[in-house]
Amino acid sequence: MMGKLLAGIAAVCTGTMAHAETARSDDSYTLAYASFGPPNTQLFIANGDGSNIRPLVERPSSDCNPSFSPDGQWVVFTSRRDGSADIYRVHRDGTGLERLTNHVAFDDQAVVSPDGKQIAFVSSRTGQADIWLLNLRSRQLTNLTHHPGGDYRPAWSPDGKWIAFTSDRDSESAFEHTGAQFAPLQRTQIYVVRSSGSGLRRVTEGDAAVGSAAWSPDGKSIAFYEATPQDFLYMGRTFPSPPVRAQIVSLELSTGVRNTLTSGPGRKLTPQWLGDGRIAYVWSGTEEKPGQGDRASDYWSEGIRFVDGKSGPDGLFEAIRWSRDRQSMVFQRTLEESSAPAVAPVYSPDPMFRLLRTGAFPSFSPDGRYIVYSNSGRRIAGTGRAPSRDTPASSLFIARLDGSDVRVLFNDPAHSALGAAWSPRGDLIAFGTGVSQPSPARFGAAQVDVIAPDGTGVRRVTPGDDGNYLFPSWSPDGKRLVLRAARPTSKGLFLIEVDSGAMSTLTPDLGTDNLPAWSPTADRIAFTSRRDGDWEIYTLNVDGSGLTRLTESAGNDAHAAWSPDGRWLAFSSARGGFKDEMARVASGGQGATDVFVMRSDGTDVRRLTDDAAEEGTVAFAWK
């Protein structure tokens, strides 16, 4: 599979004319997008006290979420080694690797039943995250929790009769918005259901978000972590965030009696009730500071702690699980981002659309040789360096399409830079500098500049006042830009002449229009708006006429990008809801978006990514 992907990326790099002829003959396209999940994760096995750590499986490919079989002889886990996220198992010595599911959907978070006959796991194969059961002998699949809400993190009771899981089914989940809020808060509770599918009931109450249920050895209680919805959102972020706190709580199922087992600030995650009655959990108490950038985990971990106050081993322990006899433990670690190139080919379920993972807001050079992007994540993709005071968290970088020759295009310690767009002639790159997400309470200025691809000739295009101008997109003739312009109480789309700076209004001041994209073949512009109550994709003519709404999904639809022939629009959408507890999503604004494409009239919608992390800011390669 990887050989085919690398062959595909090599074809992109052979030259603009060759790629254009191929694209015309087989109607294929290349897209780049940003993912806020970790670039790669690997599984490790160790003694029960954390000593003798060694890799479990070689050739890691986003291997994650391991757990032991009851006899401790197998480890089940998630991997993308064959393309989509599927469930695998392997002997504890790393031999006997076997694929257990084979579906284009997202399969994750597998746990084996106490009798070793079934696996409960999460799958999006019905359009949202449900709990499924797999009979290991017959390979029969059963959808245990078919519900429009998201269900995650199944946990078997010791007698195998019940499954506890996390769900946001009693909230609006990924589809809830408060005011102009773009990224919704996830609100979760714990439920239990019989393994036969009967007896479903909610066992936690209140406004707090909870997750990662674990059963007591006697099956009478569960432990979980609990946080406010806002802290729940921040717990997954590795960029600077306010101090957060979560606590470990136990709940007696027959009486509803709760006991808060921990106190104080810090992240406390993934409790596990060990056979001797102790409850272990992953802990971190340090808040990341700007420029620190030395954490490579998909959520924070400074070590293992116990609710009795004792400490376990320090270090990065993610998704940790002990064997039943407590003699071994398995866990995942995120590999250093320097191990991933700035541009990397990734699996696509649709052969018409080749996918590249890169930094945020990518844009291809017209000759098909380079890509410009904003760095996203804890380290600067392709360089192995953490952002420093001299390199803000969003500087502009240029790289070849094979991920080599990475260099800084623009970096200003005082201003972030993002939303780059390569001009049709290839001589200029437009981009925004300043505050990217202004709000009435925290409004800040931003400007649009242009720069030559060699980093010279930076000049300002927008007026240079206290307005917020961002997300430029070029007209087909390279003479104008469409951009988002905002004031503390307004937000709309404007056209600007690159040479003269003359501006004109494109959309009326509704306060919601954003992220414009000019069609490379026509005077038509796609954009994101909440003018009808939900974030959707619209198009209109350059003279403001012909407004058309293209999407009508419950989740956010945003970040539209045109194919070079104007026939397709790529975009990100949260229509599938969350696929995991928010605390497990790496840095990013929302954890429920995937990449989709549709025809320019809104028909023939196709999903291209299916993951638990935020994925979006798509760009097509030029033909």
Image (tube, helix red, strand yellow):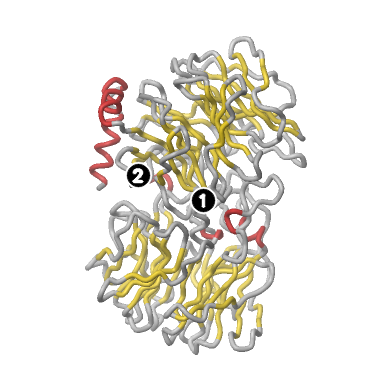
Q: Mark 2 highlights which residue? A: 346
Instruction: Tell me which corner region of the image, top left, top right, bottom left or bottom right, holds residue 494.
Output: top right
Looking at the image, residue 493 lies above or below residue 382: above
Dot 1 corresponds to which residue? Answer: 575
Q: Nearer the viewer, mark 2 or mark 1?
A: 1
Residue 250 image position (x, y, % from top left): 60, 80
Is there any visible trace of residue 580 in the rendered image? yes
Q: Position of residue 605 (x, y in %)?
A: 43, 43
Q: CA distance from mark 2 to mark 1?
A: 22 Å
What residue is rendered at 50% in x and 43% in y?
Answer: 572
| Amino acid type, callout 2 | Val
* Residue at (54, 88) in percent of width and height: 220
Q: Secondary structure at mark 1?
A: loop
What is the crowding at mark 2: few (fewer than 14 residues within 10 Å), some, or many (at least 20)? some
Residue 108 placed where, x, y %?
40, 63
User: Label 1 crowding class (10 Å Cα cut-off): few <14, some 14-19, many 20+?
Assistant: some
Q: What numbered label is drawn on residue 265?
A: none
